[in-house]
Image: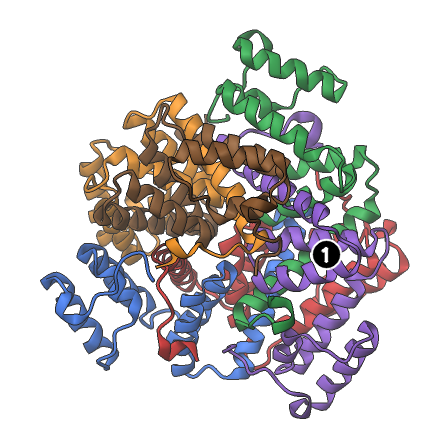
Chain colours: A red, B blue, C green, D purple, E orange, F brown
């Protein structure tokens, strides 16, 4: 069980209900992911994280799919199952193919390998990349 | 100082020299990043990681810039300064703008925030994303 | 299954049994958490980690509840389910409310977000905070 | 050098300038930390993270000092120097003593040790802490 | 379910089948671990990671068991259950005893504790260890 | 500057002085690493971590060099410069060669790569490794 209860619609405080209405409208579905149902225990936290998510993930200088790939790369590095599964679904909904996902995995693996090769050798940043 | 010496060209073993030749040809520049000069202490490791890097970062199902962004997202999550600085330069060389980099940072920050909200609440993966 | 067996009381070496006696007396309950039953495979490790835990978590300059919150913040950042669940219970036993836990989650999420914004921008520490 | 420039007051976009005004008023000082000067390259990101920070760190169910300690515990676990140095200063400004900081370090060290003992043994969560 | 399907032998592309043949010959068993069956969705990734694994884990300046212990220490620090379970089995097959595994856990726990004590105190590297 | 002062010998509390005497005797040198001089601000923390270190790193079921390699693998994964530099020196003092260190780096890099491939694919642990 989660450490804060997963709230059903009829258990929501008014401020949380208003956020759920926005989520449903923005996503075009009645389904609300369970992370929001858990965060709804603190309606102010729910409102802040939802508005931050909507603004951050909206297409801008980077398109929506690229943002999902970046989100996945960070979540895979942290091994967050909830985030990996839900954002893999989001990325697929925005067009990610199996081949693209496999290449993303390969790049994330390579980066993590080099992150440790750099850490363990204590190589200093080349002067040309430092300034 | 790095924990393994940074080798100059005239200190390279023949196998390492051959890898440096490939790096220079592939990159179209005489400059070889210091991480390769440190890895050159173990020519077999140098050869393996270079061939893996070339194959993994080549455009495929994902284009080259997207791969750099994914690499950066993982490296920022791990706080690897060497990797962040060198691959920011690589991403800029492939067209990344300041606005794109700022949005990448925002997405990486958001993912790391949610990674911990999911960890701390122990929210279970919604049935629809599990199977 | 755990990778080292979970030992029952009648499987304990004498040194491990003595530590279990201390745990039971200190906690005021006959129940001993499974992590201790697994660590009991190496009685010296069990003894060291128990005495370190008792000394570290005892109220001192910081009160007992604050120490549990700090413990949780680290464990959530590392996504250690065992540690999060057992120390959430410990924190609740020391008075943590749902509202306090939700605020802790928000702060941990915020910190992790800024940790990556700082990593990715490579912002240098302001002179006034450096010395 | 940071990877996005550190903006002086006369380089700020109007939206960023408005946020700086708020920061100065809320903090009661003319000094604005460099992380905000770097984030100011993306005024919308600056505005979002500042309003989130103000709301999250304000005293509520947890007092202001406790929130700083929780923030530090996460930042130490991630080894974010910028965050550790600036929030140690913030915690001291809210009353943190050397003795309290040393105990915080001890608890964070203990938690990180147990996080790995739990990871390596794959101990399962005791039934009583699972539901 | 995994996010890429686990391929049976009769679903393998020819390049993947060739890698499986090598794995079976090198390991002396018909059993192929599921991680390879998942990576087989991208035969080039499978081929690269297998050849890298074989070369890296082969006895050289470090013997095979020591390499498994080092692999475990990294995987425990990252809390990768798949890697911990499969490489614990590999280490046991190469002679690791329960007593050795318990000592490995103790060292990994100690290192993680000190990693955070060093991070939180911002202790500078002693001059004698810096150059 | 460190966040707690680095104490000189004449600034030590009696309990801390006693620990320094033990460190000097155990190490056979008058030099005391700076991490101990910083931890000396909390003599009880100093005493606990020193006695834990001595017991944990002493040769037992694993020899002293292997323990240093395991310590390094964890510290490299966490990118702790202080720990990497001081324990690389300790490992070299116990016989680690450049070739061994390079192989350790390769294994740590490989493990970190696979940790993320496992995380990102959500591959389930094979039944034979689960029980």
Q: Residue at x 60, y 50 (%)?
A: A82
Residue closest to the eye, F109 or F92:
F92
Give residue E79's position: percent from left, percent from top: 49, 42
Residue closest to the eye, F115 or C108:
C108
**Quadrant the N terminus of chain A occupies:** top right
Query: Which residue position holds label 1?
Result: C107
Give residue E89's position: percent from left, percent from top: 36, 30
Q: Quadrant of residue D41?
A: bottom right
Q: Residue at x 60, y 62 (%)?
A: C115
The residue lying furthest to the left in this view is: B14
Q: Quadrant of residue E82?
A: top left
Q: Residue at x 75, y 81 (%)?
A: D20
**Quadrant the C terminus of chain A occupies:** bottom left
Instruction: Tell me if I can see residue D114 in this picture.
Output: no
The residue lying furthest to the right in this view is: A14
Q: Is residue F1 left or right of residue B38?
A: right
Q: Quadrant of residue A56?
A: bottom right
Q: Residue at x 56, y 51 (%)?
A: A80
Give residue A22's position: percent from left, percent from top: 78, 67
Give residue E71's position: percent from left, percent from top: 36, 41
Residue closest to the eye, B70 or F65:
F65
């Amino acid at each position: 069980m989660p450490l804060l209860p997963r709230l059903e619609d009829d258990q929501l405080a008014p401020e949380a209900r208003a956020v759920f209405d926005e989520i449903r409208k923005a996503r075009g579905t009645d389904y609300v992911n369970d992370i929001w149902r858990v965060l709804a225990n603190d309606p102010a936290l729910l409102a802040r994280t939802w508005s931050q998510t909507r603004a951050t993930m909206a297409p801008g200088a980077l398109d929506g799919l690229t943002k999902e790939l970046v989100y996945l790369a960070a979540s895979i590095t942290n091994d967050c199952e909830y985030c990996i599964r839900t954002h893999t679904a989001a990325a697929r909904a925005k067009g990610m193919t199996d081949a693209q996902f496999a290449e993303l995995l390969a790049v994330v693996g390579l980066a993590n390998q080099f992150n440790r090769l750099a850490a363990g050798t204590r190589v200093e940043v080349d002067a040309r990349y430092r300034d």
